[in-house]
Image: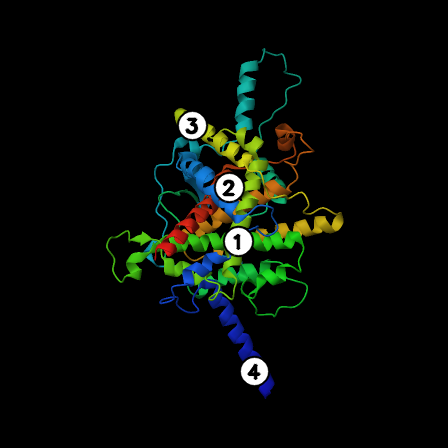
């Protein structure tokens, strides 16, 4: 028989778990009738960003006036518009039959992918070698004795492909879909915008609980077996952790914050108002939903910290773009449309010029330095994020899975750029692109498109924050 004390402990644990889940997902109570609710979301969103040297105000100005207009324009081009993804993978961690049946959860099929993009996965080096061989020519009998048969059997090709995939996996921070799989399909990102689909409840909550409880690093002191670390004064616990572990948590929290801002800014208003004006629905900003997710009084004081984490992950990906700029400027953004391809390259170069001009970039040089322990911590960091990328295959809503996979892949690509070591430079020396490629560093088209689009989502979130701020001020 249980004692009265044991019963009380169980009750308290249950209440704690419910409260933590409610405060993060904004379902604790309503803000209706509270005129100060909106102001509370922004009153603490100012000053220096944690573990960085720049301020919220500096980033607002830089992003909204200089960077976002260029980035948003770039993402309209075909090269960044179409992304190949496998939305049919089974969840690797649990059996899940909670497939979203809401019509807004579905992803519209893509039928008009440019032929150049479909062939972009062909190895460019192989094509260059064939062209070189053709131009060099062969004299009859000249190389008969020294002839080397360079053709490979299908078995050997499969073996080499697996070998290459293994090498790439040692550098990657996230699980990248195999673009040669029959289950991988191109998706038009402009035709399938990220927005609130109605996907919610236990299935959606389990995704984030798994990420925070099982994959985020924890403080050394115990915080409770069933406690959701994201909702119990996480900012205080972070002070007890090293920079690397704080970075992991803030990156995840910032990504989560960005997604919640998108859902609030592109909310299904037709359902909210109890009517449906069209088959496509009526979408727009929902200030009340934003307040529920970020009001400090409804989130245990965590709302403003989560908003600041958006700026943190923005700086992380901004630094990755700056660091990879020489590599990205050397690429061929090929779609088959010669005129547009030239415009894309110019737009990429223009954007990266602005990125590099930012004076207060995130400094990753002090991370993972210090011998074997640092190397071990980096591998733990990589494995934790790898697991997060696999959890995206457990999302029950196809559209949510699409954008979750894209944004996690983009962040994982940024981490690969920052911490693989292949793009590090000594002093004022420029990055040696040839050396970087020889060291096995490369970015696939899947990674490149995800990197730019994921950063585009963060950039758009900061713009949306300003829009919410103005809406609340006018009320």
Name the element at disc 1. Answer: helix
Closer to viewer: mark 1 or mark 2: 1
Disc 4 or 2, which lies upstream in sequence?
4
For disc 1, the marked residue is 308
**Residue at numbered disc 4:** 8
Label 3 element class: helix
Q: Determine which residue is flagged by label 2.
A: 451
Residue 463 is at least partly visible in this image: yes
Mark 4 or 1 closer to N-term?
4
Query: Looking at the picture, how far across and down is residue 410, in whole percent?
Result: 51, 44
Question: Which quadrant is home to the N terminus?
Answer: bottom right
Percent coordinates x, y for residue 437 in the rendering: 62, 32
Alpha carbon distance from label 1 to label 3: 35 Å
Q: Secondary structure at mark 2?
A: helix
Residue furthest to the left: 277
Q: CA distance from mark 3 to mark 4?
A: 66 Å
Label 3, residues with CA under 10 Å away: few <14, some 14-19, many ≥20: some
141 horizontally vs 444: left or right: right
């Amino acid at each position: 028989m249980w004692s009265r004390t044991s019963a009380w402990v169980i009750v308290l644990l249950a209440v704690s778990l419910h409260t933590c889940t409610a405060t993060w997902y904004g379902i604790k109570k309503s803000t209706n009738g509270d005129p100060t609710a909106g102001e509370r979301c922004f009153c603490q969103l100012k000053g220096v960003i944690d573990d960085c040297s720049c301020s919220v105000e500096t980033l607002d100005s830089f992003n909204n006036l200089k960077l976002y207009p260029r980035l948003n324009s770039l993402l309209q081009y075909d090269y960044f518009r179409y992304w190949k993804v496998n939305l049919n993978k089974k969840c690797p961690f649990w059996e899940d039959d909670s497939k979203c049946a809401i019509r807004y959860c579905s992803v519209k099929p893509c039928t008009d992918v440019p032929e150049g993009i479909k062939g972009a996965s062909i190895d460019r080096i192989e094509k260059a070698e064939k062209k070189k061989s053709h131009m060099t020519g062969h004299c009859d009998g000249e190389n008969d004795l020294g002839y080397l048969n360079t053709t490979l059997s299908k078995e050997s090709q499969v073996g080499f492909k697996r070998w290459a995939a293994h090498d790439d996996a040692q550098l990657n921070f996230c699980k990248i879909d195999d673009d040669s799989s029959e289950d991988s399909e191109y998706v038009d990102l402009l035709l399938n915008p990220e927005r609130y689909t109605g996907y919610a409840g236990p299935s959606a909550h389990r995704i984030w609980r798994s990420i925070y409880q099982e994959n985020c690093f924890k403080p050394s002191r115990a915080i409770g077996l069933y406690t959701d670390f994201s909702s119990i004064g996480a900012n205080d616990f972070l002070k007890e952790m090293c920079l690397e572990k704080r970075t992991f948590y803030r990156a995840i929290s910032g990504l989560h914050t960005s997604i919640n801002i998108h859902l609030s800014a592109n909310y299904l208003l037709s359902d909210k108002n109890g009517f449906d004006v069209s088959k496509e629905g009526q979408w727009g900003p929902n200030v009340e939903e934003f307040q529920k997710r970020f009001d400090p009084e409804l989130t245990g004081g965590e709302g403003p910290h989560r908003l600041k984490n958006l700026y943190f992950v923005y700086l992380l990906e901004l630094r990755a773009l700056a660091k990879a700029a020489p590599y990205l400027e050397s690429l061929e953004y090929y779609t088959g449309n010669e005129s547009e391809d030239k415009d894309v390259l110019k737009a990429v170069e223009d954007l990266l010029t602005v990125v590099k001009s930012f004076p207060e970039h995130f400094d990753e040089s002090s991370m993972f330095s210090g011998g074997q322990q640092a190397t071990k911590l980096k591998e733990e960091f990589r494995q934790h994020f790898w697991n997060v990328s696999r959890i995206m295959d457990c999302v029950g809503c196809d559209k949510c899975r699409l954008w979750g996979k894209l944004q996690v892949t983009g962040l994982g690509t940024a981490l690969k750029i920052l911490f693989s070591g292949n793009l590090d430079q000594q002093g004022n020396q420029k990055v040696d692109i040839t050396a970087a490629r020889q060291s096995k560093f490369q970015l696939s088209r899947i990674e490149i498109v995800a990197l730019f689009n994921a950063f585009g989502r963060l950039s758009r979130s900061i713009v949306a924050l300003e829009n919410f701020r103005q809406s609340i001020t006018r009320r």
